[in-house]
Image (cartoon, grey):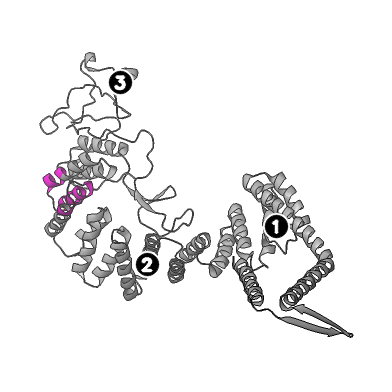
Amino acid sequence: MIRILFYLAIIFALGLGFAWLADRPGEMVVTFSGYQYQVSLMVAAVAVVAVIAAVMIIWWLLKSIWNSPYAIARHFRVRRRDRGYQALSTGMIAAGAGDGALARRKTKEAVKLIRSDQEPLINLLDAQASLLEGDHDSARQKFEAMLDDPEMRLLGLRGLYLEAERLGDRNAARHYAGRAASVAPQLAWAAEATMEELAARGDWDGALRLADAQKSSQQIERDAANRRRGVLLTAKAEALMDNDQAAAKAAALEANKLLPEFTPAAIVAAKVLFKQNDLRKGSKVLEAAWRAEPHPDLADLYIHARPADAVLDRLGRARKLQEMKKNHAESSLAVARTALDAQDFALARQEAEAAIRMQPSESAYLLLADIEEADGGNQGKVRQLLSQAVRAPHDAAWVADGVAAERWAPISPVSGRLDAFEWRGPVERTGRLIEAGRPVPDVVPPSLAGPERDDDVVVVDAETMPVSNGATTTAMPNRSPAPDAATSEEPVSHQPDDPGVTPEDEAEKPRRFRLF
């Protein structure tokens, strides 16, 4: 556009010049070899312009003729390059589609038309074609050759990293990822693998520096960066809690500030504060996390914040937690456990049954069995509660890659992935779910003296048994209740698999049940 305006300006200037000469008549006399030439000024100006134009045209023709060999060679070179790039493009598409034969054919064609030092993507297409053909050794050699080219170095490290992952060589994979992360921390795959390696070694400061570099590159969202930093700070605080309480406190409080609803961060922050006798601030940290999501570890640490407290004081703290999160199973279980320690069996039973109504679980039935054992030793009911606990849903646990753990950890024990643990219920096996609204009957242990009448035995066809919530209800034989052992002079007979309870066992301290 600018050149067109420039040419128009020149033509306009020439027009103005000729118009100016036409308005001012004059003559030009030229004497040459004894001859005198006399022309008007306008004709002389036109002649000068024509001579200049002719000279320029002749110069352009001579220059074109002189440069024609180079122009022809350049034409064929550009045509050859275009064909090479077309072959390269087709080969890359074929490699992405998984067509190894076409990718290899186009690789050979591109190599003939374009030099690999001019177009590094030819090396990538060659390596991809080798991978599609199953020649992984050749592909690794080509990826290693890319490390010498600064432009292709990251691509070569990425290829070697994926090959090491395929072979299961985690150390080699993390080595290549570390080299890539040192050059380009914004690469997600390199930063993730390197951070996992640093976390596995316990180098929390190095992992935090890498997380900060990744955040400064603005390649990940702010919430994800804060989550990662909070997890790393929590792990650092746990590692330093026994050795450097000042550093542990700083890391724990920062982690809790970044993730106030993250249970492990709240627990480690409260533990550090309790060790420094800051009961008020530690309790507030636990209360905030409890309001967000009740957790049994939060309740246990909050209730036992002061080891010297009486059981009634601990019961009051459990009641306070229940007021913060009403109608929640964990709140009822916390009160029930503390009430059992305080020997308030009525309150403990009430809260445990309320927890079962809200969310049946293995620990709730075991707790109810503990209460029955401590409050009278009705062994029949205790056995029934234990059998229900066996069939109840598993309690929630920290789960990572299908592995359940009782405590949170920053990395997965299976894959080494950072922040892999989640608080949720483990995968249930078929047949372990129980009926949610099933009442707890008051069962009296039956006598095995044998049925007095044959018609007392109820036979139920298994094919016609009612099914509720996917679980088959088992009908028990209708037998006469056993005589009261306290008033009968005859010895009480027991089930073959029930040895009964001796007076010595009844005098023992009540025990807490645990299935596994």
Where, quadrant-wise, is the C terminus in this rendering? Answer: top left
Q: Earlier in the sequence, mark 1 or mark 3?
A: 1
Give the Cα distance between marks 2 and 3: 56 Å
Q: Which residue is mark 1?
A: 122
Q: Position of residue 131 (x, y in %)?
A: 67, 50
Instruction: Please say if the residues under marks 1 and 3 sit with CB atoms less than 8 Å apart.
Output: no
Q: Which residue is mark 3?
A: 465
Asked whether, in this view, residue 436 is left or right of residue 188, the answer is left
Q: Closer to the observer: label 1 or label 3?
A: 1
Give the Cα distance between marks 1 and 3: 70 Å
Check disc 1 and report its element: helix, strand or loop: helix
How many neighbours does mark 3 have within 10 angstroms: few (below 14), some (14-19), or many (20 or more)?
Answer: few
Q: Position of residue 359 (x, y in %)?
A: 24, 41
Q: Residue at x 67, y 63 (%)?
A: 146
Q: Which residue is mark 2?
A: 233
The label number, if any, that marks residue 242 in the structure image: none
Q: Quadrant of residue 38?
A: bottom right
* Residue 4 vs residue 277, the one in the foreground: 4
Give the Cα distance between marks 2 and 1: 44 Å
